[in-house]
Every structure is written in C-alpha cells, then in structure tokens.
Image (cartoon, helix red, strand yellow):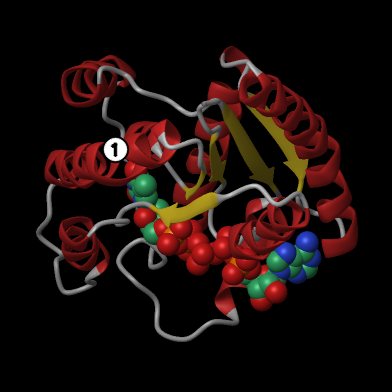
Amino acid sequence: MQAGLFISVEGAEGVGKTTSLAYIHQLLDDSAISYTSTREPGGTQLGEKIRDILLDKKNTQMTDMTELLLMFAARAQHVEEVIKPALNQGSWVICDRFTDSSFAYQGAARGIAAKTIDLINEASLDSFSPDLTVLLDVDVKVGMQRAGSRGELDRFEKEDLIFFEKVRQGFLARAKVHERFNIIDASRSITDVNSQLSDVLLPKIHTWLKLSSQSIQK
Ligand code: Z5A
C-alpha cells in the first residue's frame, strides 16, 4: 500500500490556517483521498490536556523551556498515537502546525537556540518531519487584525507585534533551508489563497493517486 502524505500548515497569528485547512480538506474530498485532520499542540486525549495548560493565560509563570518541552511531549504522543499509524494505513495527515512552530515560537520568538530544539527534536521524534509544509505568510499587522476580531485572547495571542514579527521571520528563515516548504501569499483574497493552495497540492494529489493505483495493480 502507498503510504500517506504528511502535510503541515504553518504561519503566525491570524494568517488563515483554519480557512485554508477547510479548502485542503475539500481538495482531498474531491479526489476521494482518505485523510486525518489533526492539530498541534493537541491531536490526542493527552495532547489536548497539554494544550489546555499551554494556552491557559493564567499560567503566567511558565518558563520558555517548560513551554518547549510541553510542545514536544504532546508531539511525541501525537506522532506515535495518530500520525504514524494513519500514514502507514495509506491515509494522508493534515496537521495544523507541527515542529516548525516550535522553531518559530519557542526558538525565533522566545529565544531558545535552534540547536537546543534540534536536539530535543532528534531525541523525542528522531526528527520526524512532514513531507510538505504550507507556510501562510502575511504582514503581522494584517494577521493580528484578522485574529483580533475573535473573542478572549489565549496565552500566545496576548503577545505583541514584535513577538509575532519574530515568529514570522522564524518561519521564513526555515522556509529558506527546507525544500518541503511552500510559501503562500496570505495577504491575497481567500479565493486567491485557495488557488495558490491548488497549485501546490493538485500535482501532489495526482502523483500520489497514480502511484497508489500502480501499487494496487502489482
Ligand atoms: N504553538 C507554539 O508556540 N509552538 C508549537 O510548537 C505549536 C504551537 C505547535 C495555538 O495554535 C498556539 O500554539 C499558537 C502557537 C502555539 N498561538 N498563536 N498565535 P493555534 O494554531 O491553535 O492558534 P492560532 O495561531 O491563533 O490559529 P487560529 O486561531 O486557528 O488562526 P488562523 O487559523 O490562522 O486564522 P483563521 O481563523 O483561518 O482566520 C482568522 C480570520 O481571518 C477569520 O475571520 C477569517 O475569515 C479571516 N481570513 C482568513 N483568510 C483570509 C484572507 N485571505 N483574507 C481576508 N480574511 C481572511
């Protein structure tokens, strides 16, 4: 059986991940590809409990290292319990954020050295990474305005413009060195963003369907 494809969707505050994820689901539904949609931090019962701790604005004393280790604790569980089993069954996995968020938020923005995150990534996940990463990129002010229209702010959403500018630059720096990244100009209209997503994903869908039918015929 052809293994599934692991896709992460990344970006800073209010870039439109939720909106884009809905469109990606539609593309996969239209192609009759089975997929698991999941998110980080979270994605498992244990991970969702960790998410609550991470986002709780009452946890003002949390150190940056605690935050990083909690992200990776949730991720280690997520990879073994959900992501790898789904991929092995030929299902695609669409993940709202993954390790690149830790490099952008805990690394570039909080200031933890990338080599420290690399070590934790290697030790906890054997540096398991997505096949393809969609990075939604937009001016930080625009993203914050879009996100600002929502209700109460969580522990991350309370951060300022400078923090989210560092997050954005952290993502863009990673996109420069990892070929799996596809940058989407998220300043455009939702229709235009969807069209950019189609340009990235349809060739992958067609190739995967072809390989899949060949492996069934064997
Ligand atoms: N975090 C971390 O620090 N380290 C890690 O390793 C991981 C995560 C994995 C929770 O993530 C927090 O965890 C996150 C980073 C941290 N904190 N922050 N910030 P999350 O993904 O659950 O939370 P989020 O980043 O705030 O995402 P979100 O709430 O899901 O926002 P979004 O999905 O990017 O935005 P949206 O809901 O799709 O769009 C926002 C609004 O803009 C909405 O009204 C849309 O209709 C509108 N929109 C969307 N696209 C467009 C376009 N193209 N034009 C105009 N308007 C648009």
The residue to which callout 1 is attached is 79
- Estimate the x, y position of residue 91 in percent, counting from the top left: 51, 42
- Estimate the x, y position of residue 87 in percent, counting from the top left: 44, 35
52 sits to left or right of 142: left
Residue nearest the observer in this picture, 123 or 204: 204
State the residue at coordinates (59%, 33%): 133
- Estimate the x, y position of residue 41 in percent, counting from the top left: 31, 53
State the residue at coordinates (41%, 55%): 39
Task: Look at the picture and state if 41 lies above or below 148.
Answer: above
84 sits to left or right of 164: left
- Which element type, helix, strand or loop, lies under badge 1? helix
Question: Which amino acid, mark 1?
Answer: Val
State the residue at coordinates (29%, 57%): 42
- Estimate the x, y position of residue 64 in percent, counting from the top left: 19, 43
Task: Look at the picture and state if 122 lies above or below 151.
Answer: above
Where, quadrant-wise, is the C terminus in this rendering?
top right
Residue nearest the observer in this picture, 167 or 95: 95
